[in-house]
Image (cartoon, coloured by chain):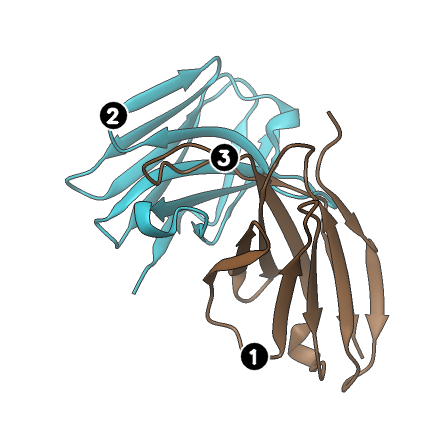
Amino acid sequence: KAGVTQTPRYLIKTRGQQVTLSCSPISGHRSVSWYQQTPGQGLQFLFEYFSETQRNKGNFPGRFSGRQFSNSRSEMNVSTLELGDSALYLCASSPVGLAGGRADTQYFGPGTRLTVL
Amino acid sequence: GENVEQHPSTLSVQEGDSAVIKCTYSDSASNYFPWYKQELGKGPQLIIDIRSNVGEKKDQRIAVTLNKTAKHFSLHITETQPEDSAVYFCAASKVDSSYKLIFGSGTRLLVRP
């Protein structure tokens, strides 16, 4: 099975611009989560989508948004970019389907390296 | 709030020795504890995980132990090899937000040949 794919792998933007990152989950996986990784803050949860609905959100400003399509692919958008948004953005997918809130394993993609100048 | 502390931040061992990384979590509702290995230029790769109804789990040279009372879990790597060199992250999540992983700050492991 192909793993989680993210595009683009590298991106350079300037302050004030907006950016859209894409994530294709492992075939059959229905949950997609996004994380931001920086040297200073480490790995931080952004949001999680399942069946085109956001189920959980981290502590990020409203400039960070996402969506999920009917084929489970997901995009995240960052508007009005700031220098501090420079980071590795990671997408993770999970199969989902077990009842009772049992946590599924999350499989990560290689990430998109965003640099804001 | 939710927090996971991880120690040490760097660890250097001789090839063949054991390595131990420790994490402490703050939220007693946490019930799932994965460990990830991240190599340069790659995303985190799951190496082992444990759930709160189990005290220990082993997979070849890797083992994880969980002490729910102390809210503490550890990763043990035996017979380390140079290819084990990477950054290791612990994480925790809980039932009502099981897809929200709270990560530790990472441990850079260097295995000297």
Task: Answer whether residue A86 is visible to the viewer in this image.
Answer: no
Nearest to the eye among marks 3 and 2: give it. 3
Query: Is label 3 on the same chain as label 2?
Result: no
Which kind of residue does numbered mark 3 sit on?
A: Thr
Secondary structure of residue under mark 3: loop
When the figure is inspected, residue B33 is found, relative to residue B54, above or below; the finding is below
Callout 3: chain: A
Which kind of residue does numbered mark 2 sit on?
A: Gly
Whether residues under marks 2 and 1 lie with C-beta atoms below 8 angstroms apart, the answer is: no
Q: Quadrant of residue B32?
A: top left
Classify the position of the N terminus of chain B by image quarter. bottom left
Q: How far apart are marks 2 and 1 (CA)?
A: 40 Å
Chain coloured cyan in the rendered structure = B
Which kind of residue does numbered mark 1 sit on?
A: Gly
Task: Answer whether residue A85 is visible to the viewer in this image.
Answer: yes
Q: Name the residue under label 3.
A: A105
Q: Where is residue B31 in the image (x, y as percent from the top left)?
A: 29, 40
Q: Where is residue B51 in the image (x, y as percent from the top left)?
A: 32, 31
On residue A62, the disc is 1
Classify the position of the C terminus of chain B by image quarter. top right
Whether residues under marks 3 and 2 lie with C-beta atoms below 8 angstroms apart, the answer is: no
Q: Mark 2 points at which residue?
A: B55
Rendered shade, chain A: brown
Q: Where is residue A99 in the image (x, y as percent from the top left)?
A: 36, 34
User: Which class describes the residues within 10 Å of circle 1: few (<14), some (14-19), or many (20+)?
Assistant: few
Query: Residue reaching furthest top?
Result: B60
Q: Distance between the residues labelled 3 and 2?
A: 18 Å
User: Which class describes the residues within 10 Å of circle 3: few (<14), some (14-19), or many (20+)?
Assistant: some
Callout 1: chain: A
Nearest to the eye among marks 2 and 1: give it. 1
User: Which class describes the residues within 10 Å of circle 2: few (<14), some (14-19), or many (20+)?
Assistant: few
